[in-house]
Amino acid sequence: MSTLLSAILGTLVATNTPAAISNFVEKTTGFSVPVRNLNDPAARELAMLEQQDDAAMEEIDRWITDNRRFAAEGAGLSDEELNRKILARLDVVRRAYEDFLTRHPDHAEAHVAYASFLADIGDEEGEVQHLEKAARINPDIPAVWNNLANHFGHRGPVKRAFACYEKAIALNPNEPIYYHNFGTTVYLFRKDAREYFSINEQQVFDKAFELYSNAMRLDPSNFLLASDIAQTYYGIKPLRTNDALLAWTNAMALASDDIEREGVHIHFARIKLGIGRFDEARAHLDAVSNPIYADLKRRLLRNLNEKEYGTNPPPVEPAKTAVEPPPARGVD
């Protein structure tokens, strides 16, 4: 599902709104469907049902994109009409999954697929019910435990999320998303992590970064992962300056375009401003020209000038004008 569709469905369809803090945790499932025996009629039917699911999401995505364009031209459906149309299309898929599971109630993969569909449309309660059914039927599907952990990280109890992430990693130690999610949950819920692992707060940070390190080891070219990791240093007091700068250096090496690189320059400037390396901070800001960073750059420049010069910033030197040379003297 596209980001656009996910965002729209979250607004139009969601039955439960996750707590704001949970937005840091990825909802990616990491679920890879094993090779199925397509001689099995149920496996063939489920594969077709998942194709129907994907087709519905793509169609809804087109509706949303097209309707935004039509609305900009003064046409298009109202939000209420579009919502009804989306809900009707999703209901077709919902009923197909429910019909399949009525006939195959112990099909673990079908429960996982339906849980993923319910997560996409914001039915978190239904998602969890089917994940728990899948876990009872087949406790060896690692993505089930990752997704249950995501839920418990959102809704609690958080310590149960830790246990579920551990289970997911034990079943599949080569999935970077599990380490990323686990590290973020440890970082966000430090009190629970201290109690669960019997460690102090600085050791909680170490635990989170150990998990992040495993995620990067398994997905070393992921810029978004590297930048997420680097940003977590802002929450550590005192700031681990060298580690933070190294993390942003790693992110810079993975940046694929000027937008990503300029974003990293913004973070470099923020850190170096905070530790008094003003010339370096200014050089980083000089490297930023994209308008999307204009407000951040302006705010950082203001803070930089205040810290470096206080209330008396240096006057701007007037531009020098060229001085006409004296006329050449003739030779007598």
Image (spheres, helix red, strand yellow):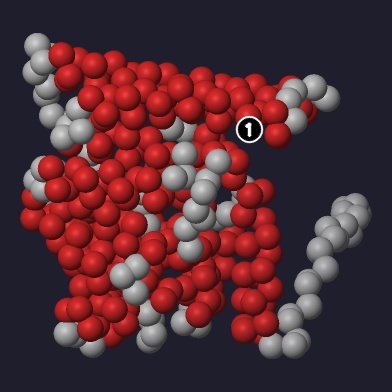
Q: Position of residue 161 (x, y in %)?
A: 26, 64
User: Would you say 206 lies left or right of 93 here?
Assistant: left
Query: What's the residue at 68%, 64% (across, down)?
Result: 298
Q: Is residue 34 among what the camera can see?
A: yes
Q: Position of residue 183 (x, y in %)?
A: 27, 64
Query: What's the residue at 36%, 23% (across, down)?
Result: 96
User: Which amino acid is tagged 1?
Assistant: Asn
- Please name whichever residue, 173 or 120, is drawn nearer the observer in this view of the structure: 120
Circle 1 residues within 10 Å: few <14, some 14–19, many ≥20: some
Q: Residue under circle 1?
A: 83
Q: Position of residue 150 (x, y in %)?
A: 32, 56
Give the tally of numbered discs: 1
Outermost residue on the top side: it is 39
- Please name whichever residue, 94 or 276, is drawn nearer the observer in this view of the structure: 94
Give residue 319's quadrant in the image.
Answer: bottom right
Quadrant location of the N terminus? top left
Query: What's the residue at 14%, 48% (across, down)?
Result: 136
Judged from the image, the secondary structure of the residue bearing numbered disc 1 is: helix
Outermost residue on the front side: it is 102
Tell me if residue 325 comes above or below residue 273 in the rendering: above
Q: Position of residue 138 (x, y in %)?
A: 11, 43
Query: What's the residue at 66%, 48% (across, down)?
Result: 291
Tell me if residue 49 comes above or below residue 7 in the rendering: above
Tell me if residue 310 comes above or below residue 208 in the rendering: below
Q: Is residue 202 among what the camera can see?
A: no
- Please name whichever residue, 77 or 62, is drawn nearer the observer in this view of the structure: 77
User: Would you say 327 lies left or right of 160 here?
Assistant: right
